[in-house]
Image (cartoon, coloured by chain):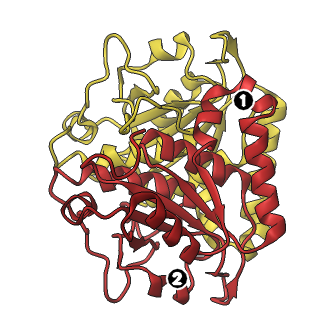
Chain colours: A yellow, B red
């Protein structure tokens, strides 16, 4: 991994938001952290050279849980059995709010990040393909792809974001991917769409 | 979903192979089924209109486990709480071997399927982008994307396949995605690369 901001390559971070998100009735909640989300997104971050994946939760017991998981893989028996996993989990960072993520990236890169919200549904105002890497290269700002758990990001999180990414629309009217699979497709498209026309 | 083989649209199936696969020492094993793999791949199949995702395991207790999971979501409380999940899990089919998958697809589509192996690493003989949908449209044969759990497909499975899909190579030397994330990216690329040049 290059130190963020030292090259012209676009720098993208992930943020997996657990609160505030919506439940199936549209109410604002704090969702529980899912162990496998963290593994999958850390491995995704490592594969696409994203400097970090932020786990956003204000709940202290959930923060403790994530710290315990990271310790196991970084310093416990996990690191000996699975050095590849250690390399990936090193990219996880726990923060209480998305505002804290913004401050953190700002401190690391020296520039305010651009935030892209993601959703399974097209938003009223956005939904176009933003050609993210080009925007990051031109503005020399880092980017953050903001993913929601539960039934998606709460209104308050949307308001913090500068744009939205085009939802993953497959070949059917069904659109209920896991956040793990959706994140993988969105990150892959983000970088591949730099040189190919969007559909 | 259209009935497979009734339209000119390319028909792709998934097969998640649990045996024979390799362990970290390269030995042939039967891997355990992971609940979340089945959910994620069923949802992926539903989103991209793949008629089925085959769960391949010869172990009867593992087959029972998958059947129990499917029953819960199709007929149990799961279907009432989560109708979207029921729609997806309906696409799971359990078979003891990959040969059984081939027979099944043959019976359903009236044509022998083309099998593509997947791997995190480029194989000696393959690894090119196969422009899969074009091949399926031209030959009017169904396709099966064959995914391995554990440390990847055993030699015997490779020999049953007609080609390989280009591995997901991100932006770094790290290449250890979960099978859930890798499958999502590979299915997305499979259909998107029909009209765009491959990288």
Q: Is residue A22 visible?
A: yes
Give the chain of mark 1: B
| Quadrant where the image shows the N terminus of chain A | bottom left
The answer to whether tags 2 and 1 share a subunit is yes
Query: Which residue sits at x=72%, y=78%?
Result: B30
Q: Position of residue B164 (x, y in %)?
A: 36, 75
Q: Is residue A75 left or right of residue A45?
A: right
**Residue at the spot 55% in from the left edge and 77% down from the top edge:** B99
Q: Residue at x 19, y 39 (%)?
A: A198
Q: Is residue B18 left or right of residue A160?
A: right
Is residue A64 depicted above or below B79 in this figure? Answer: below
Say which residue label 2 marks.
B157
Which residue is labeled 1 in the image?
B79
Local secondary structure at mark 2: helix
Residue A150, position as x, y percentages in the image: 65, 26
State the image quarter where residue A25 is shown: top right
B160 vs B168: above or below: below
């Amino acid at each position: 991994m290059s130190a963020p901001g030292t090259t012209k390559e676009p720098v993208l971070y992930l943020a997996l938001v657990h609160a505030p998100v919506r439940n199936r009735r549209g109410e604002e909640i704090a969702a529980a952290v899912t162990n496998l989300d963290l593994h999958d997104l850390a491995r995704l971050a490592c594969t696409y050279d994203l400097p970090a994946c932020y786990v956003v939760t204000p709940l202290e017991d959930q923060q403790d849980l994530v710290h315990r998981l990271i310790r196991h893989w970084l310093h416990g028996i996990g690191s000996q059995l699975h050095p590849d996993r250690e390399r990936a989990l090193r990219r996880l960072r726990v923060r209480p709010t998305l505002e804290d993520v913004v401050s953190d990236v700002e401190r690391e890169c020296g520039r305010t990040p651009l935030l892209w919200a993601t959703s399974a549904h097209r938003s009223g105002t956005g939904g176009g393909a933003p050609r993210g890497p080009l925007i990051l290269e031109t503005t020399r700002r880092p980017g953050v792809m903001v993913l929601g758990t539960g039934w998606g990001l709460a209104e308050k999180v949307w308001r913090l974001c500068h744009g939205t990414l085009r939802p993953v629309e497959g070949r059917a009217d069904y659109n209920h991917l896991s956040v793990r699979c959706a994140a993988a497709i969105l990150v892959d498209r983000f970088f591949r769409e730099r040189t190919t026309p969007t559909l």
